[in-house]
Amino acid sequence: MHFIEKEPSQKRIDFDQKLRSNKILRVPGAYSPLTAKLIEEIGYDAVYVSGGVMANDLGFPDIGLTTLQDVSTRSYLISRATNLPTIVDIDTGFKSCKETVETFEEFGITGVHLEDQIERKRCGHLENKELISTDKMVKKIKECINARKDQNFKIIARSDANSVEGINKMIERCKAYIDAGAEIIFPEALHDEKDFEKVRKELSGYLLANMTEFGKSKLFNYKELENFGYNIVIYPVTTQRLAMKNVEDGLRDIYTNGHQNNIIDKMQTRKRLYELVDYEKYNSLDEKIFNFSDEGHE
């Protein structure tokens, strides 16, 4: 374990270099800063902040109810807890793509992805989505690109068109998004091998695969996705789903039995928590500062 050492600009350089390695980057979602620290410790390539997870954590459905302040503040807290790059879902841009990109760049984020749905958006793996026109999405992408100061800040274009207009129309849209300057394409809600392979064959540039559970996409091993030619795989809601299932089971057990003795073995220990938050290192640093201060007053 270690203290946070990397500046946001270095995290962006790291992410760019990782993309150029031609090895698929594995990026789990973090719903909290502590989760981000665990993602880094295990050895993943980056951290992802899902818009759906942010909405759910606030007690809302993922239908465009969160604000720029909601998501940017939480994303900042998550990103500052790790040396890994952090990628954030900005939904449809929070009304102003310029302000949104400026905010997330200032908060130390590595890149953001923008989707081509209307403002009252839906989860990419649900039905009844509505899209904006290709021209409007292109305009948004260009606004994002013009707003960034660091050229290594990644602008990712997500298309939800597959389940609305079909895969061929989605590919046409994505080509226009690439021409507009999007460096990474996120084709949402692909179904099977044929879909993933067809998109890779038709599109240039970096591709992001979404391996969310209980959705429309078959869940592939990351090596399979790498063989398909994808550059990034995200697991956006996995950590929240794991946590909430165990929290629910534990609370029900305590409610029924009146004590925690049946579920102690399912809990993170105090010792393990202290390891993860670098308790001893911070404590040691605090003692050095305190002792130094004392010596200064002698």
Image: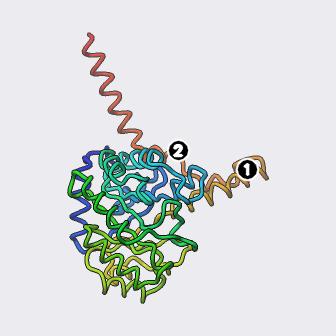
Is residue 46 depicted above or below 286 in this figure? below
Q: Which mark is residue 192?
A: none
Q: Secondary structure at mark 2?
A: helix
Quarter occupied by residue 146 = bottom left
Picture colour scheme: rainbow
Which residue position holds label 2? 270
Residue visible at 40% across and 85% down? 168
Residue at the limit of the structure toward the bottom, as seen here: 194
Density class for disc 1 (Cα within 10 Å; few <14, some 14-19, many ≥20) is some
Q: Secondary structure at mark 1?
A: helix
Which residue position holds label 1? 254
Residue 218 % position (x, y): 50, 81
Residue visible at 33% across and 65% down? 156
Q: Is any part of residue 129 visible from this angle?
A: yes
Q: Nearer the viewer, residue 75 or 128?
A: 128
Residue visible at 33% across and 72% down? 185
